[in-house]
Every structure is written in C-alpha cells, then in structure tokens.
Image (cartoon, helix red, strand yellow):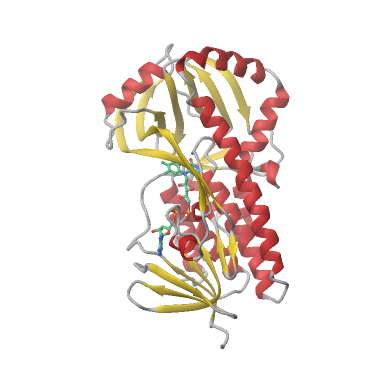
Amino acid sequence: MSTPDIDVIVVGAGPVGLTAAIVLADLGHRVRIVDNQAAGANTSRAAVVHSRTLELLEPYGVVPALTARGLPIPRFTIRDRDRTLISVPFDGLPTAYPYTLMISQADTEKILLERATELGIVVARPATVAAIVQGNNSVTATLSGGERISARYLIGADGMHSTVREQAGIGFTGGSYAESFGLADIRLTGGIPRDEVILYFSPAGLVVVAPLPDDMYRVVAVAQDAPHDPDTGFVQRLLDDRGPRAVPGVVTEVVWGSRFRVHHRLADSFRRGRILLAGDAAHVHSPAGGQGMNLGIEDAVTTGRTLSRVLRGETAALLDEHAAVRRGTARSVMSTAGRLTDAATIPAAARPLRNTGLRIAGAAPVVRRRLAYRLSGLDRR
Ligand SMILES: Cc1cc2nc3c(=O)[nH]c(=O)nc-3n(C[C@H](O)[C@H](O)[C@H](O)COP(=O)(O)OP(=O)(O)OC[C@H]3O[C@@H](n4cnc5c(N)ncnc54)[C@H](O)[C@@H]3O)c2cc1C
C-alpha cells in the first residue's frame, strides 16, 4: 500500500483538535481536520485557561491574542458566605503567566482557528467521520457521505461521545454524578470581587462565581431544579442563599445559561495502532478546578510533538509510552477534580465540619501553595 499524502487526520475542531493540528503543522506536517458541525461551537463552556496551558501554547503564536482577550485573575478562593476558608494564590508562581486566565471557550477556539488558518490548515466541515479502518501503513476515515481520507495517523479529538474511540474499540470506563449543575454567564452589581474565582462552599450548597471579560461573571451551582434556561430570578436566589451576605450581588442580566450533568470517565487506552485519543474523547470529569480543556490542550501539544518524532522516523513505541503517561496524568487530574467535587457536594449535615477542616488547612501556606501548583498545572511541568 502506498504512503498517504496526509500525515495526520484530526477528527474534531474543538480546542484540542485545533491545537493538535497547529502543533503538527508548525512542525512541518501535512494535517487535515474534519468536524461534523457547520460552524464552530459558540457556547462558552470552559472559561479557565491555566498557567501551564499558556506555557505549552507559547511557541505557537496564540498566547498574545488569548491574554489580550482574557481576564487575568490572581487567585481562587473557597468561602463560606463572607468568610474566606482558603485562598489559593497564583500570583507568586514561578511562570511568565502567574494567574488564571478567564476567557470563554468560544474565544479560545476562535483564536486557535485563526492561527490554524494562518498555517494553511483546512477544516473540512460539516464532515462526520462514520468509520475508521487501519492498515499496515495508513489509517482511513470514511465520512458519512462516503468520502474516504487516508493518513499515516489519526487523532481522535471528537469529544466525549467520540466515534473514533468507538471505532477503535476502546472502552470508556467510569460513571456520572447524581447531581445536576446549573450554569449562567451573567452581569451583576454589588459586592462580588472581580479579581477572584470564588467557590462558595456555603451551608445551603455550592455556587461558583468567576469574573469573565466584558464585565460578566460565570455562575455554576449544584441545583437539582436547575432550568434549561436560567433567568435572573433563579440566579439571584442562588446568590442570595449561597453567596456573600454583607454586600450581596445583584443580578442585572443573564446572557447565556444551561444545565448539565457531570461525568467521570477515562478511556481504557489512549492509543490503538495508528489511532490516538486526546481531550474529552480520552477523559471527562467534573469542571471543578477548571481542568478539562486545559488537560486536553496539554494532550494535544504533547501528542503532536511525540507524533512528529515518529513521523520523522523514530520508533512508534514512543507513542505507547506517551499514551501511558498521558493516561496517568489524566487519572491524577480526575482524582483532584473528583475530590473537589465530593467536597463541594457533601451532604448538608457534614458541611460545617468540612468548612472547619478547610479553614484549618487553608491557614497553612504549604497547602495553599500545593493547591496553586496543582490547579495551575505547573506540577505537571
Ligand atoms: C458546562 C461546562 C463547563 C466547563 N468548564 C470548563 C472549565 O472551566 N475549564 C476547563 O478546562 N474545561 C471546562 N469544561 C470542559 C471543556 O469544555 C472540554 O474539556 C473541552 O471542550 C474539550 O475539548 P475537545 O476539543 O476535546 O472536545 P469538544 O470541545 O467536544 O470538540 C469535539 C469536536 O468534535 C466534533 N465531532 C464529534 N464527533 C465527530 C465526528 N464523528 N466527526 C467529525 N467531528 C466530530 C464536534 O462537533 C466538536 O466540534 C467544561 C465543560 C462543560 C460542559
């Protein structure tokens, strides 16, 4: 069989697929992206880009646009109404990006797509990968319209319901949390600071309030009764019951909102032959700590770099090593997000004890610093 013209097919033009394609094209490889949507998603979803992600993206020319558009936030805090239990500082971290960058996923994707276009990468859309067959020298994706595309390798960055993962016969082991979550991007006035991502671990339950660009805030809450389209009354009640009491926040507008369930699943393997998985196709977990897209972008950069070495003639065993390391990293990040979610959703009777424990732990600088390293991703350097 002849060697295909394309080096790598990337399935999925989300943040992970776009990043993988940019890395490979930057290293001189021929890449094609296919995505089943007619246009990129414009929902905000991931809102946090951590320091390590910015460090990894630095060589690819997108960081100036991301930092110009995003809002740098120097700390995460966990509070019980007005009382701070733990403050996690990013501003002392040894990095060129000593903050967490708040930016909507739609903007992150737009900036990545612009860079991909500059590099000459074509995104074929709408184009749905329906089947994948591997040969000795190539892998062939068949689109739902019947067109076939062959390449030397294929990266499945096609999200949680990955067709690539299914076609590769790779299991996705895990489950779902019982709780429902409500999410809203809002405008408000009142006493909520714009220089902190705040997790209110209050007696009535969890609400996260995080500043976004354009004078907005992201609100996420555990809420059994969360509506599909939350209105100002719903979000106001959440803030009144769980947010600050001394100077309450007053919701003036709900710009966008949604309801979602949280899953925790890990692919049984991140590689099968010429197929590699990255991002949500390989792992999904709670958004606590804002890790999902960050971990996916890390997968994309490291997979692109490793695959480039193999495409240039190094042993394909590098890919197994890489897949095992990435899976271990994902498991560890999932465990941190899971612990944070368990703490956030603990039954009401245990919340006072949890908060006392957090306050005591939060008084220790070493705990705060360790959390900052973990959440920023710098512990994975
Ligand atoms: C409510 C919510 C809040 C979140 N908040 C955060 C946060 O604060 N921080 C964070 O880091 N993460 C967060 N996440 C997670 C983050 O959104 C995901 O981790 C991220 O989108 C994963 O990117 P991806 O590129 O792997 O997959 P996706 O963004 O899902 O992209 C996959 C792409 O593949 C395409 N596709 C699917 N199937 C096919 C097919 N068969 N053929 C062709 N194309 C296909 C899809 O159309 C899509 O464009 C949040 C998620 C949710 C739901």
Give the answer, above or below, for where 33 lies relative to 98.
Answer: below
Q: In the picture, which quadrant includes the N terminus?
A: bottom right
In this rendered view, identify the residue nearer to me: 140 or 360.
Answer: 140
Please state the total of marks drawn on the protein image: 0
Q: Residue at x 52, y 12 (%)?
A: 352
Q: Percent from the top left, x then y, of residue 358? A: 60, 19
The picture quadrant where one finds residue 72 is top right
Whether residue 198 can be seen here? yes
Q: Is residue 370 left or right of residue 24?
A: right
Whether residue 123 can be seen here? no
Q: Percent from the top left, x then y, of residue 370? A: 69, 31
Q: Residue at x 34, y 61 (%)?
A: 39
In this rendered view, identify the residue nearer to me: 358 or 166.
Answer: 166
Give the answer, above or below, for where 319 lies relative to 105.
Answer: below
Q: Is residue 88 left or right of residue 123?
A: right
In this rendered view, identify the residue nearer to me: 25 or 16.
Answer: 16
Q: Percent from the top left, x then y, of residue 155? A: 53, 65
Give the answer, above or below, for where 105 lies relative to 79.
Answer: below
Q: Residue at x 44, y 48 (%)?
A: 105
The picture quadrant where one finds residue 177 is top left
* Farthest bottom residue in view: 2
Q: Percent from the top left, x then y, of residue 354? A: 56, 17
